Amino acid sequence: MISMTFVYWLLGAYFAALAWRGVRDTGNPRRHTTALFWALLALLLFAAERMPVRAVGVCVIVLVLLAGFGGLRMGRYRESSAEDKRGEAQRLNNRLFWPALLIPAITLIGTLGLKHVEWSAKPLFDSANTITLTSLAIASLIALATACRLTRQSPWSAVEQSRRLVDAIGWAALLPLLLATLGSVFDAAGVGQAVAGLVRSAIPVDNAFLVVVAYALGMAAFTMIMGNAFAAFPVMTAGIALPLLVKLHGADAASLAAIGMLSGYCGTLMTPMAANFNLVPAVLLELKDPHGVIRAQWRTGVLLLICNIVLMYVVVFR
């Protein structure tokens, strides 16, 4: 039976390899703190469920301190020469894209085709709710093996090259993992009700247009704080959309939710918290300004947000 534990251990093994390789990298001026960061993350992925809650909390605090005080730095990495890279690109041509295309294809096959497969009278996958993530992990391993076969490199070469990328991104690589949990945490803490109370006291809730503006701006603002529109959605929908727009003004819930998510995506264009979209591309493109992507697109985000507000008001009350 394949469960999420397999995924956690796979990630833990990868981060442990990063830590082991990082501590041996004498070209990194802060190799010990960099290695400690990835080693702690590996420890949590391997054993967090069996560790005392306070020990897990201490590990998280240490991770924050290492990241906050500049404990992560880049080191020295083995790279092929530009001529070798050009030669390999010409040899492989379009086959370079095969590993990248295998990941979504195998994930889709696993999600849709292996849901009811059994092994020794037991389901192959532990839970139908986690089959997509498990299939993604398996697809990544198959893509890795394919890439190694195509490029005639070892799996360790893939780890070494990915270490260069992960070290360049640094702590921001963990933002999607951490921010994904914020929506449920905020919802459980009653932030949605607090937001609803604030809106009721700030604007006349019998004015549908002002409530629409509050919902759209709230989605954008919370997305900028959390870095993830999916994390902002349950908070703002529970606090404003459902009680004030759907129940009070009779708005259409489906179109309201769809345009609300679009409003959240406008916030994604304007925040460094959305590291995958705004910080990682700057690193990959080696931009001198780490916030260059945001500076180039924030005006588009504001314009789209205004359009979403108008569209929401016109569509949801039809």
Image: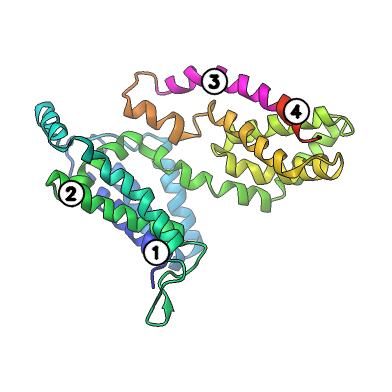
The reply to whether callout 2 and callout 4 are in contact (CB within 8 Å) is: no
- Counting residues from the start of the chain, the first of labels 4 and 3 encountered is 4
Tag 4: amino acid? Val
**Residue at which label 2 appears:** 148
- Res 305 quadrant in image: top right
- The mark closer to the camera, 1 or 3, is 3
- Prevailing secondary structure class for the magenta stretch in the rendered image: helix
Residue at 34%, 28% in the rendered image: 283
Q: CA distance from mark 1 to mark 4?
A: 45 Å
Residue 267: which disc?
A: none
Q: Position of residue 63 (x, y in %)?
A: 41, 46
Q: Nearer the viewer, residue 184 or 4?
A: 4
Q: Could you tell which of marks 2 and 1 lies nearer the N-terminus? A: 1
Task: Report which residue position mark 3 lands on.
Answer: 298
Q: Which residues are magenta?
A: 290-308
Task: Name the residue carrying label 4.
Answer: 213
Q: Amino acid at mark 3?
A: Trp
Q: Label 2, label 3: how many angstroms apart (C-alpha)? A: 39 Å
